[in-house]
Amino acid sequence: MSDVIEVSGLVKDFGPTRALDGLDLAVSRGEVHGFLGPNGSGKSTALRALLGLLRTDGGTARLLGGDPWKDATRLHRRLAYVPGEVTLWPHLSGGETIDLLARLRGGVDPARRAELLDRFELDPRKKGRAYSKGNRQKVALVAAFSSDAELLMLDEPTSGLDPLMEEVFQECVREARAAGRTILLSSHILSEVERLCDRVTIIRAGRTVETGTLASLRHLTRTSVEADLAAAPDGLAALPGVHGLVVEGTRLRCQVDADRLGDLLAALVPLGVNALTSRPPTLEELFLRHYESAAA
Amino acid sequence: MSALAGTGALLRMWLRRDRVMIPVWVGALALTAAGTASSFAALYGTPEQVRSFAAGITGNAATVALYGPVGSETVGGLVAWRNGVVGAVLVAVMSVLLVIRHTRAEEEEGRLELIGATAVGRRAPLTSGVLAALVANTALAVATFGGLLATGMAAAGSAGFALAWLGAGLVFTGAAAVAAQLSESARTARGLAFALLGGLYLLRAAGDTTEAAWLSWLSPLGWATLLRPFAGERWWVAGLSVALAAALLAVAYLLADRRDVGAGVLPPRLGPAEGTLDGSGALAWRLQRGSFLGWLAAFAVYGAAIGAIVPSVTDLVGDSEGTRELIAALGGEGGLTDAFLAASFGMLALLASVFTVQSVLRLRGEETGGRLEALLATDLPRVRWAAGHAVIAFAGTFVLLAVSGLACGVVYAIASGDPGQVGRLTLAGAVQAPPAWVVGGAALLLFGALPRLAHAAWGVFGLCLLLSLIGPILDLPTWALDASPFTHAPTLPGGPIDPLPLTALILLTAALSAAGLTTWHRRDLTP
């Protein structure tokens, strides 16, 4: 079966600015695909181009087997979209907006809508202008998840949600995948993508820099470790897989390849560990890494 | 930190934002006053002519209801009569728009939050918005005074007239400041202020035309007449305006000090939990409904008012040969009554095109507002979405003009006992729609082809307005006058209906609209 989204060499210019510079993206049916990139890297532009809201200046794009520009209306029947910046009609209530979008997409499923309103703790009677950013996002999310679209395109959907609601969102994504839907999730938060996505495409400056399963991107994921030790460490730089080691007295900072974390801990424990934090690398660190390795 | 810190910086920013709006308002109003003065001075050269014109007005309740009574039988008195109350209404509109734009609208958009977090005092936003309106009103008073003086009007009367307008501006600056505290929505706040304006206008009309003359003293719009510019000025009436404005501002500050940023005094109402809108057409109607109904009410009232004046048009003109020629030159043929009606409907067509342009530009508003993305990501075809708003714009324009003709016809039919006027005047109103449609078509084409310049449609309207109002006076060549679609509307009632120009206007509208929808279909979404 063909991919749900096939993009190759996509180019989009806004006057002198090149927003997409040869973007490649392939999303297979039934997967949750992470679309990662820093702010301004062209994620939203790519989604808008896929929705036929923008004309492209080069390359090819196929969406659900059709042309995103020419077949826009026909294709839209089969997908649901949550924009990155959700704006609502100030004088329509949230419920009215949800129902309007649902009707334009084919129909309302009242049971599913009620369940989602309940889970997202959203009051549908408030007027559009009375919602906070997070609640506006919930309106768009309820509209998208209550549809039976086969493809969900979500543009940084959790940027306004609190951690509890993020949890609800992640459940919804997992349920959608279980129901056989395809999800394209744009984000600049690596941990969110790691929790949800089967495969990931990373873009920077409108160009795809990495794509593959998370396992295959493991070489990109190092863990940052900070430790406060009882004695000054020595000889750690020689450990394989340890990078960027900084030692200040008894304090230590470094990054370590995921498969070498155990070795590092084994070396630290005999020194006596007072405090230890480890966290996954941020997207920016990942990019730095990527460019390091590209340069090497 | 003082509660007013940052007021100056905010005021400078508002005045910069208004660098076009304020001069246009001030220029248009001051020129109207000076223009009326110079044309009345030319038209009514002798005291007899002035007296007979004034007597015609006083004897007609409809004109007194619309414009107020004549203060004195002088050219100055006539200028004050013609512009005093009506101008005061426009000055009030300007003040309300300015105050709400810089206070509640900023707050509703969330920009005030950004400002409020800087070293800006709690009272600075309201104060700066009020000051912006005061700057505009003061500039207007000075320009009006200067303009009247320049046309040779008496200094005291000119000052009184400028003060009468300034008084209305002050009162409605205060009223708008209060309205801005009441609702969370700028639209509702403007609606409240305009409703008050309408109510005070009617109160004054009732006071001026009935035995209960004291009613006019209750209306700040009545004060514009009661100050008696050019008729033995009662200067202390201006004090009433100042006192009321001060009281209103005090209330506004009291309310502002007690509420949260972003909140209103009136609690926000909840909407329905479930919606019934089932398509983009229904959504477009829902979004435009309020504005359209407001326009409809205004057009019905305006039509009815014209119908009420018609029976006395011949008295109104009196012996003045100048006016008779003027009205005949305004495009009417046949009887003076028909000429007056045709001129009135021509003016209505221009007004209706404001609605047309505003309604078409909703398309651009939805696009820049960012609400369009989610809509177009459903299986809603672009052209159908645009057509939904365009249909309201075009059909709405037609309905406005037909209803205003109908209202005029009904009132005139009752007054004249001739039921035939109903159909005749409804038709006369309805046939004015095609030129307004052409302007709407141009707006649609701009939206499609040059979205960032879509608001240039107001320029198209302004050009037509200039050609219609000033063109004949300047003796412009025929081809220049013919460039305005409004030149080609039939002069009804009284004139013939020539199908050729009407067909041409309709075809031109269709071509412009088709080009607009095609270019829209092919372009990027351009926020």
Image (tube, helix red, strand yellow):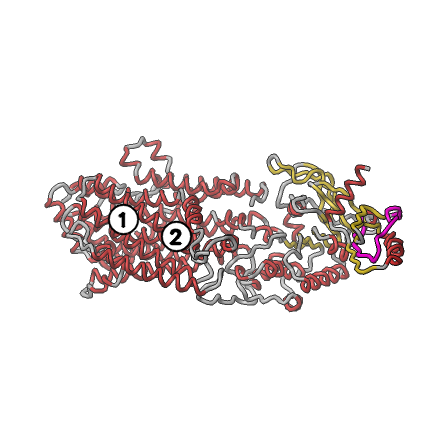
Q: Quadrant of residue A277?
A: bottom right
At which x and y percent is residue A33? 75, 52
Which residue occupies the foreground of this view, B39 or B307? B39
Left or right: B398 in relation to B470? right
Over which residues does the magenta segment extend?
Answer: A220-240
At label 2, the amino acid type is: Leu
Q: Which numbered disc covers residue B483?
A: none
Which residue occupies the foreground of this view, A262 or B108? A262
Q: Mark 1 or mark 2, which is nearer the start of the sequence?
A: 2
Dot 2 falls on a residue whose secondary structure is: helix
At which x and y percent is residue B3? 43, 57
Is B412 a magenta residue?
Answer: no
Task: Tell me which residue sits at (50%, 49%) in the image.
Answer: B365
Above or below residue B131? Residue B470 is: above
At label 1, the amino acid type is: Leu
Mark 1 surroundings: few (<14), some (14-19) or many (≥20) residues within 10 A: many
Left or right: A103 in relation to B54? right
Label 2 or label 1, whichever lies nearer to me, is 2
* Residue under pointer 1: B341
Above or below residue B235? Residue B15 is: above
How many marks do you count on the picture? 2
Dot 1 falls on a residue whose secondary structure is: helix
At which x and y percent is residue B451? 52, 42
Mark 2 surroundings: few (<14), some (14-19) or many (≥20) residues within 10 A: many
* Residue under pointer 2: B97
Q: CA distance from mark 2 to mark 1?
A: 31 Å
* Residue B65 in view in this figure: yes
At which x and y percent is residue B73? 13, 49
Marks 2 and 1 close (CB-CB < 8 Å): no
Write down the chain letter for disc 1: B
Task: Tell me which residue sits at (68%, 36%) in the image.
Answer: A58
